[in-house]
Image: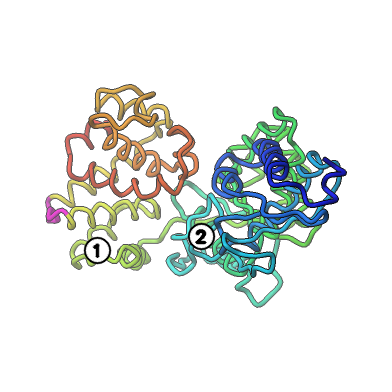
């Protein structure tokens, strides 16, 4: 095939070569990225030096070129025996097709387009972290500090800051890699097992902005932490920036000194809870994002909750909005739901994902396997929305929830969160059984 590559291969030969390339790439990129961005591609033409690849994602050509060229060319070397150039073109486009950068409405997998700086409330507890993240995203007028580590208890808004930073950088046409600690660890281990480490390494180190959420997940994973340190070094050596979030200060995680010192040489800043005087503004902002109007007495009651957790306050607003949408919003009903929220959030121990799944399965008289599967028999669709809402409200990311539910795409999980919350609001007895 190496000699054949110097002339225009016949269509059948070119198609067979491309299938071989895709076969190699299944081990080099995440399953979701492969299915979304690479599997729908097809070879359009090859003149011996440049391979044209047709993609249905015609508006994302610059981003595809940026994200996948390195691993594709490596796979092509394996198939052709030599290096060739590669170029994406949109469906229906000829060789001179233009390209545009990926729009903010279609961020890479793992980044939520709904979490932006515009709907993040500046507060005393997040002032320093917000400024650092805005600088990292390219909005600042000064050279950004890197790496930045934001830490704080669950629910104070760390992940929102990370997604907002990613979205802003994506709008500027930057190459953003966004991963949770779990995704980084699993990707690294899968690459090692599949002897496809080079693909994983290139994928995470190609970023101009590398973002890692839930650093605490990697505590104690020596090999993965070494790989993270090398990734951070590689990104920074290429002029890129790094943003990390953790529930604990990096020095409290028992990280290797080499990694801890690298993180400390940038900026490590804590996030605090929303202060009592700031909660009303937060409640009103959350309602505006939902395009919902709440009566003043409702806003007052939520703002008076004895919790400064952004996650708890958001959950309270969502509860009130859903009560209003189903015609059940009154003082007595809202107070009952707010009491449940406060009691649940104040529980001394948090249930694991497996315990939540088992509890929902028990209430719906099914098994955890059926609940997490694909069957739509009987009440399984409703039960699935409930377990999704509970997992998200317990602090699990959409990516993590999707992985727990038979590898579902996070974008298909997100719309079901509100449906699950509405089911819980409309069924107090179910809510009490699950909370208990």
Q: Which residues are magenta?
A: 326-332
For residue 331, say whether it is visible.
Answer: no
Q: CA distance from mark 1 to mark 2?
A: 33 Å
Image quarter of residue 193: top right
Q: Which mark is residue 106?
A: 2
Is-magenta flag for residue 23? no
SS assignment at label 2: loop
The crowd level at tag 1 (other Cα within 10 Å; few <14, some 14-19, many 20+) is many
Q: Position of residue 100 (x, y in %)?
A: 61, 68
Task: For the residues labelled 1 and 2, say whether their Cβ atoms are less than 8 Å apart.
Answer: no
For residue 257, say whether it is visible.
Answer: yes
Task: Answer with left or right where residue 304 lies relative to residue 92.
Answer: left
SS assignment at label 1: helix
Is-magenta flag for residue 327? yes
Q: Position of residue 124 (x, y in %)?
A: 48, 66
- Dividing the image into 4 quarters, which one contains the C terminus? top left
Closer to us: 123 or 22: 22
């Amino acid at each position: 095939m190496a000699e054949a590559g110097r002339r225009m291969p016949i269509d059948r030969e070119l198609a067979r070569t491309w299938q071989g390339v895709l076969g190699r790439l299944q081990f080099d990129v995440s399953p979701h990225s492969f299915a979304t961005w690479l599997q729908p591609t097809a070879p359009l033409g090859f003149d011996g030096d440049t391979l044209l690849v047709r993609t249905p994602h015609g508006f994302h050509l610059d981003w595809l070129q940026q994200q996948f060229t390195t691993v594709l060319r490596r796979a092509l070397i394996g198939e052709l025996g030599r290096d060739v150039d590669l170029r994406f073109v949109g469906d229906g486009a000829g060789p001179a097709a233009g390209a545009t950068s990926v729009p903010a409405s279609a961020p890479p997998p793992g980044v939520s387009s709904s979490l932006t700086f515009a709907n993040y409330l500046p507060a005393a507890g997040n002032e320093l972290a917000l400024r650092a993240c805005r600088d990292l995203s390219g909005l600042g007028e000064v050279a950004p500090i890197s790496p930045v580590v934001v830490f704080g208890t669950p629910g104070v808004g760390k992940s929102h800051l990370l997604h907002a930073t990613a979205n802003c950088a994506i709008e500027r046409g930057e190459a953003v890699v966004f991963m949770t600690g779990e995704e980084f660890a699993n990707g690294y281990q899968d690459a090692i097992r599949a002897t496809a480490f080079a693909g994983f390494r290139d994928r995470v180190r190609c970023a101009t902005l590398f973002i890692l959420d839930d650093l605490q997940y990697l505590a104690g994973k020596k090999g993965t932490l070494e790989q993270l340190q090398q990734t951070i070094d590689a990104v920074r050596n290429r002029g890129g920036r790094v943003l990390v979030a953790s529930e604990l200060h990096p020095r409290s995680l028992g990280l290797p000194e080499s990694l801890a010192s690298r993180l400390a040489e940038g900026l490590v800043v804590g996030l605090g809870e929303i202060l009592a005087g700031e909660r009303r503004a937060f409640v009103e902002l959350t309602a505006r994002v939902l395009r919902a109007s709440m009566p003043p007495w409702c806003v007052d009651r939520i703002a008076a909750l004895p919790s400064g957790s952004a996650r708890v306050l958001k959950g309270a607003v969502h509860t009130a909005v859903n009560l209003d949408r189903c015609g059940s919003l009154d003082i007595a009903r809202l107070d009952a739901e707010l009491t449940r929220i406060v009691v649940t959030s104040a529980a001394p121990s948090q249930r694991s994902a497996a315990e939540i799944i088992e509890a929902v399965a028990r209430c719906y008289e099914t098994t955890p396997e059926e609940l997490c599967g694909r069957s739509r028999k009987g009440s399984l669709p409703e039960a699935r929305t409930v377990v999704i809402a509970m997992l998200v409200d317990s602090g699990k990311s959409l990516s993590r929830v999707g992985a727990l539910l038979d590898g579902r795409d996070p974008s298909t999980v997100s719309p079901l969160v509100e449906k699950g919350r509405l089911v819980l609001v409309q069924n107090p007895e179910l809510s009490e059984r699950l909370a208990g």
